[in-house]
Amino acid sequence: MISLDGFRGNPILSINPRAKRIIFRFDRAQGRTVIVIPSKQYVGKVAQHKDTFNQWVDSLILKERITFSNGLIFPFKGAPHTLMVSPLDIHLKRPKVELFNAIIRVHGHHDDIRRHMKKFLRDEALIVAKILSEKYAKALDVPLTHITIKDMSSMWGRCLRQKELCYNWRLILAPSPIFEYVAAHEVSHCIHPNHSAAFWKTVAILCPHFKENRAWLKNNSTMLMQYSL
Ligand SMILES: [Zn+2]
């Protein structure tokens, strides 16, 4: 297995003898990035292209950015939901976001959809982040001081000072087991501030199927990172 450590978005490596050099490409159908090399001899050279590749991924995410607008179908907790905008009801004092039957309905003005969706998605992410982090912290008997939701472009979570956790809001778009894995990962950092064998053992105690979830996240991170608030 070729290690592509440090390559943003976890690309897959593909050999194509017709390629004349190393090529980066985005497979839209799969939502993944691909590094194409002409032959096996090029495997050793891929690492030299890490910085260029990461810059290319950044520009790709910007270009392919998906923003929240009326009619958008997007994943919420792993299932497709449709965003619908309705005029603000005169009985509602404040704009409201409702979730019913796979429809997320924003009562408000079109100009404000992004602002309302930002609040809604971040609030939902925080609810899940708190439940999961507190559950895992209790299981490991570690104290947590702060749990926050952030807009990060290349990370899913962070553990600071071994007691403060922050999570990427886009985790609320992914299926629930993915958020569980990231929470188990970050809470385990409260004990092990590294990625040692002992760290992964702790993750496995909290989240026995973490390998599948970690693989899912690797394969889908480019797709999730396209969503922008
Ligand atoms: Zn980590």
Image: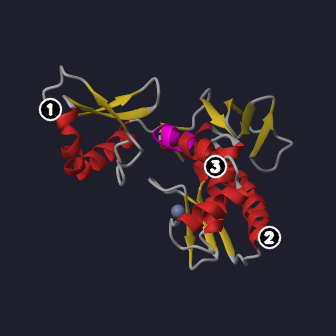
Main SS category, magenta section: helix
- Which residue position is annotated with label 1? 21
The amino acid at mark 1 is Arg
**Where does residue 48 sit, x and y in percent of width and height?**
19, 51
Query: What residue sits 64% from the left and 67% below the top?
Result: 188
Query: What residue sits 18% from the left and 19% below the top?
Result: 18
The amino acid at mark 2 is Lys
Compared across the picture, whether 223 is left or right of 62 comes to right
Q: Are marks 1 and 3 in contact (CB under 8 Å)?
A: no
Mark 3–mark 2 distance (CA, rounded to whole Å): 19 Å
**Where does residue 73 sit, x and y in percent of width and height?**
62, 28
In the picture, residue 98 is in which quadrant? top right
- Which residue position is annotated with label 3? 210
The reply to whether residue 61 is visible in this rendering is yes
Residue 222 is a magenta residue: yes
Location of the N terminus by quadrant is top left
What secondary structure is found at the residue carrying circle 3?
Answer: helix
Identify whether 29 is placed above or below 132: above
Residue 74 is a magenta residue: no
Mark 1–mark 3 distance (CA, rounded to whole Å): 36 Å
Identify whether 173 is placed above or below 26: below
**Which of the marked residues, 1 or 2, is nearer the chain's N terminus?**
1
- Which residue position is annotated with label 2? 138
Compared across the picture, whether 137 is left or right of 210 comes to right
The reply to whether residue 148 is visible in this rendering is no
Foreground residue, 157 or 42? 42
The amino acid at mark 3 is Phe
